[in-house]
Image (cartoon, rainbow, N blue to C red):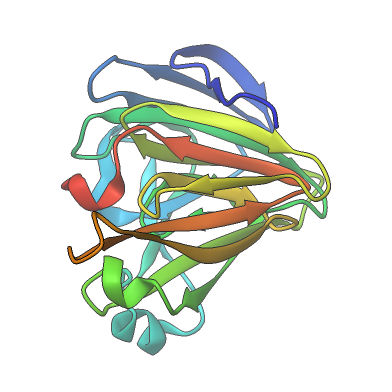
Amino acid sequence: MAVPVLKPTNVTDESFAGVTYHIQGELVPVLQIEVGPVPVYFEHHILLWKDPQLNIGVKPMGGGFKRIIAGMPLFMVETQGQGRIGFSRDGAGHVFGMHLKRGEQLDVREHQWLAATASLGFTFTRVKGFANMMFSGTGLFIDTFHCEGNEGILWLHGYGNVFEVTLGPGEQIDIEPGGWIYKDTTVRMDTTIQKLATGLFASGGNLLFNRFTGPGRIGLQSMYLHLASE
């Protein structure tokens, strides 16, 4: 298996999918996007600043009632017009962009994306099983972004630093359940439990992992999500 590699932490004048963006900052990084004709949508609470001439409007999204039940935002918002806009999460971490081409998809842990170009579609699914143990019974929701246009960008936030590993067909890696942030949809995720015993008559414990099977990419964050606070 390949060794996970640190993703770039600072980006300047990166252009793709009709927008130019910059990522700066070491502890709590900021994503700055120069919005042109291509709108960008995002969760409303992560907006940091914007040019006055750049307006914000509600983005129509299906399944609003389900999003309330799932604990997800009641509404998404999107840019209207052109100008600069800045985003950040309220937590130390690592911000980076994922460039997608037509037909490509990416699974992302809930509430860890910052923004996306309008060319990316959005759906979500609930993962049960280990979620009741790790997330206090609320379950784990995975957002799936798929590129409906020729190309698009998805900007993500990871806690700590973010590393990427690429698995070949059949290759596997075990990751602490709070330690992954994204994966290609071609990567299968299962749960495995390793029992620990401390002696013949002593009680033991369990180690819980998500086991990922390739092919595809996986993003790891060095600060476990359930230990972090948004």
User: Residue 24: horizontal and vertical position, in percent?
Assistant: 36, 15
User: Residue 14: horizontal and vertical position, in percent?
Assistant: 60, 17
Q: Is residue 79 visible?
A: yes
**Which residue is at 67% across, 41% downward?**
217
Q: Considering the image in quadrants, where does the N terminus appear?
A: top right
Along the viewing direction, whichever of 13 and 94 lies nearer the viewer: 94
Q: On screen, 126 above or below 80?
A: below
Question: Seen from this angle, which residue lies furthest front?
Answer: 200
Q: On screen, 129 above or below 20?
A: below
Along the viewing direction, whichever of 57 and 61 lies nearer the viewer: 61
Image mark count: 0
User: Residue 201: horizontal and vertical position, in percent?
Assistant: 19, 66
Q: Is residue 153 visible?
A: no
Give residue 67's quadrant in the image. Answer: bottom left
**Which residue is at 63% across, 32% downward?**
165
Along the viewing direction, whichever of 20 and 93 lies nearer the viewer: 93
Q: On screen, 94 above or below 224?
A: above
Q: On screen, 95 above or below 140?
A: above
Residue 214 as seen in the image, left or right of residue 222: right
**Which residue is at 30% across, 58% downward?**
197
Along the viewing direction, whichever of 58 and 64 lies nearer the viewer: 64
**Which residue is at 39% across, 44% downward?**
179
Give residue 47's quadrant in the image. Answer: top left
